[in-house]
Image: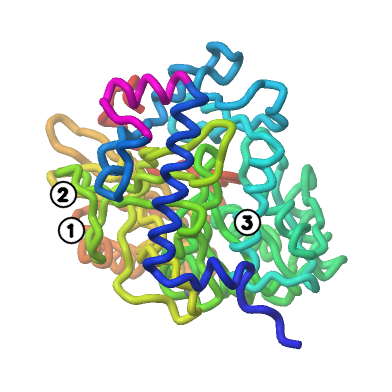
Amino acid sequence: MADPMYWNPVLETLPREKIRKLQLKKFRKIFQWAYDHSKFHRKLYDDAGIKPDDIRSFEDIRRVPTVEKSMMRDIQGKDPFPYGDALCVSLEEVTIFRQTSGTTGQPVYQPDTWQDWEWWMECWSYILWAQGYRPRDRVFIPFGYNIFVAFWAGHYAAEKIGCEVIPGGVLDTKARILKIRELQATAMMGTPTYILGMAETARTKMDIDPSQLTINKITCAGECGASIPSTKKRLEDAWNAKVYDHAGATEIGAWSFECTAQPGGMHVNEALFLVEIEDIETGEIIEEPGHRGKMIITALDRQAQPCVRFDSKDVIEWAAEPCACGRSARLIKGGVVGRADDITKVKGVLLAPSAIEEVVRSVDGLGDEYEVIVDKVGDAERIQLKVEVLDEAQDQCRLIESELADQLRLKTNLRYDIEICGCDTLPRYEVKAKRFKDLRKPKSEK
Ligand SMILES: [Zn+2]
């Protein structure tokens, strides 16, 4: 018998009006739950003059105040220690501590109950099944199991759907590659940066061609890369594997995924999450495709520390067309295209760092790493871009530099001071890369 196509055939093909009805019903329930069980939420909603019974439509939901990461930081360390009063269950019911990765400041603590943890695994089961993971897969997880959630839930979901899981844990990159070869692993998960770095290590330090190994699919998360066409292509060529994007966050859950149809975007798992897109300037909710805004998201089933209209700062837009895979959950075009925090004005032009990545990774002869520094020289703003030229392309440096400058100007409308570096001179990252440095801001705002 052929494999079933969907992890949850009912929810994944539910007609749109039924999905919306389900979302509204679940939103009312989680809102009531947060209101009844957390002082933090009750005060927030009382101050805004909104009560659970007031919520009857999606328009009513828009009146519910959003929660910012900084608000969660402020209550942290208070009672009930260490989570503060957004906690909706007793401390006895909390079974797992995690924290955010701290990329954008002091990490935020995240408690989960066992029921929440099972929900995490369920969210990830949709992702893996949609990306073609099946019980016959042998999944290698090249991840330093740590205090933030990253691939933990992916690990358990892979077990849940019946795959065989190899925890790569504290092995170093070379040992991981050898283990993949030894056990003939078929799939793996990692940040795009790390998966590219692994391929480079295999090729340049071990004389192993990663495209000859048995990996046939890779799930990427943690950065936008797998939805950036030129980065996806580099990843897929390096490993001779299909590469799929996924976005999730510690304080939200695993909310979106690319499917095997590779539709140029990711599905929002709308049976489990409510995603709203807010216009950054007007604050209006955007329903139409083709207009970018920041994501306001609600995890419809998460209980210990609810995520109700969380202001994620992820910049996304709805896709115009449904996906060929038959899932009714909407697609966001091009995945998460940036962070509202990262999109910055340079020389009066709006610049998204992911646009620079797209260009750098599309130019032949360049390595995978790059670094961008925005600073001021006197009153003038300057963008420095450091790239690595591959050894075999050293004699074409000038040609590469001029192509890069042309493409950047076309794509971003800005001029860059390009610095060509030798192979392996820029920093390498295992988890989230920090390639964009804005030195114009005072320290406290970083
Ligand atoms: Zn699809």
Q: Which residue is mark 2?
A: 349
Instruction: Indicate the position of residue 360 as horizontal and vertical percent values.
Output: 39, 61
Q: Which residue is mark 3?
A: 124
Nearer to us in this view, 350 or 294: 294
Q: Is residue 422 visible?
A: no
The residues colored magenta run 39-52
- Near mark 1 (Cα within 10 A), the count class, few <14, some 14-19 or many ≥20, is few
In this picture, residue 171 sits left or right of residue 285? right
Q: What element does badge 2 sit on?
A: strand
Instruction: Indicate the position of residue 21 as horizontal and vertical percent values.
Output: 40, 58
Q: Name the image quarter holding residue 375.
A: top left
Q: Amino acid at mark 2?
A: Val
Q: What element does badge 1 sit on?
A: loop
Kindly identify the residue that appears in the image at 21 percent across and 61 percent down.
409
Q: Name the image quarter holding residue 399.
A: bottom left
**How far is disc 3 from disc 1 in space, using C-alphas?**
39 Å
**3 vs 2, front mark:** 3
User: How would you classify the magenta stretch by its main secondary structure?
Assistant: helix
- Near mark 3 (Cα within 10 A), the count class, few <14, some 14-19 or many ≥20, is many
Residue 413's disc is 1
**How far is disc 3 from disc 2 in space, using C-alphas?**
38 Å
Instruction: Indicate the position of residue 229 as horizontal and vertical percent values.
Output: 42, 69
In this picture, residue 56 sits left or right of residue 242? left
Q: Residue furthest right?
A: 182
Task: Tell me which colouring the rendered structure shows.
Answer: rainbow
Q: Considering only vertical position in the picture, is 298 above or below 363?
A: above
**Of pointers 3 and 2, the one earlier in the residue sequence:** 3
Q: Name the image quarter holding residue 445.
A: top left
Kindly identify the residue that appears in the image at 38 percent across and 40 percent down.
309
